[in-house]
Image (cartoon, rainbow, N blue to C red):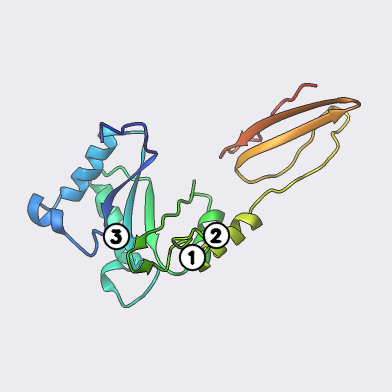
């Protein structure tokens, strides 16, 4: 981790620990907690994740229900774990993405995919030819729906123009008479109204 410190924005620290306890059997019951503490100490600015499968896929897998997933996170938090994100594998892609996008506590959504020699898993966004699979179509549809899109307007008498937009990067072009100015700005999470000035 020290080799790549500052280069990765996130680490998947513990993978599928509800189904398997390989490290706990060999290193003791606090192995996973120690992994998170070490990861945070080595790269404190990185987002740390915990991944598990079947959490939102099936109710028949008693090892990875939503309740057992939350219970494991709470146990690690009580031990002093530093963690900022969760990873879920499942088939309810659109519902999970919509829930995450609309929830005020969610700062971002990351998607990953996996290829297999015999083909692609169900959660793959594209196939080997990089053409969309059904999951990719879902993501593209939502990205299009969530775009702020192009907006046109006229400033008020003080030269101000207000709008509501999603978090992210924006390009703006301002014109007055034969003068124009182009600029960019970024909207990040905040409880306050953001103000940006552009001079012609």
| Residue sitting farthest toward the right | 177
Residue at image location 9% in from the left, 57% down from the top: 25
How far across and down, in percent of the image, does residue 17 sit? 23, 58
User: Horizontal and vertical percent for residue 4?
Assistant: 30, 34
Residue 35 visible at all: yes
The residue carrying mark 2 is 139
Q: Name the residue under label 1.
A: 93
Q: Which of 27 and 3 is in front in this view?
A: 3
94 versus 186 height, above or below:
below
**Residue 95 shows up from this direction:** no
Of 10 and 127, nearer the camera is 127
Of badges 1 and 3, the one in the foreground is 1
Quadrant showing the N terminus: top left
User: To which residue does mark 3 refer?
Assistant: 71
Specify which label sits upstream in the sequence, 1 or 2: 1
Q: In which quarter of the image is residue 80?
A: top left
The Cα–Cα distance between marks 1 and 2, rounded to whole angstroms, is: 8 Å
Residue at 39% x, 39% y: name it.
Answer: 9
Cα separation, mark 1 vs mark 3, equals 23 Å
User: Badge 2: how crowded within 10 Å, few (<14), some, or many (20+)?
Assistant: some
Q: Is residue 174 or residue 81 the one in the foreground?
A: 174
């Amino acid at each position: 981790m020290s080799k790549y410190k500052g280069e990765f924005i996130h680490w998947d620290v513990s993978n599928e620990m509800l189904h398997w306890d390989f490290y706990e059997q060999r290193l003791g019951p606090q192995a996973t907690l120690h992994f998170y503490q070490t990861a945070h100490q080595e790269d404190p600015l990185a987002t740390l994740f915990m991944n598990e499968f079947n959490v939102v896929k099936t109710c028949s897998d008693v090892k990875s229900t939503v309740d057992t997933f939350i219970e494991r996170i709470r146990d690690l938090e009580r031990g002093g774990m530093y963690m900022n994100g969760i990873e879920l594998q499942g088939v309810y892609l659109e519902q999970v993405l919509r829930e995450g996008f609309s929830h005020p506590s969610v700062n971002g959504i990351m998607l990953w995919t996996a290829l297999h020699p015999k083909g692609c898993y169900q959660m793959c966004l594209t196939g080997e030819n990089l053409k969309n699979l059904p999951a990719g179509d879902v993501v593209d549809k939502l990205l299009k729906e969530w775009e702020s899109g192009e907006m046109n307007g006229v400033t008020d008498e003080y030269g101000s123009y207000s709008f509501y937009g999603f978090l992210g990067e924006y390009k703006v072009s301002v014109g007055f008479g034969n003068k124009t100015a182009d600029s960019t700005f970024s909207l990040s999470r905040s409880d306050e109204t953001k103000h940006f000035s552009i001079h012609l």
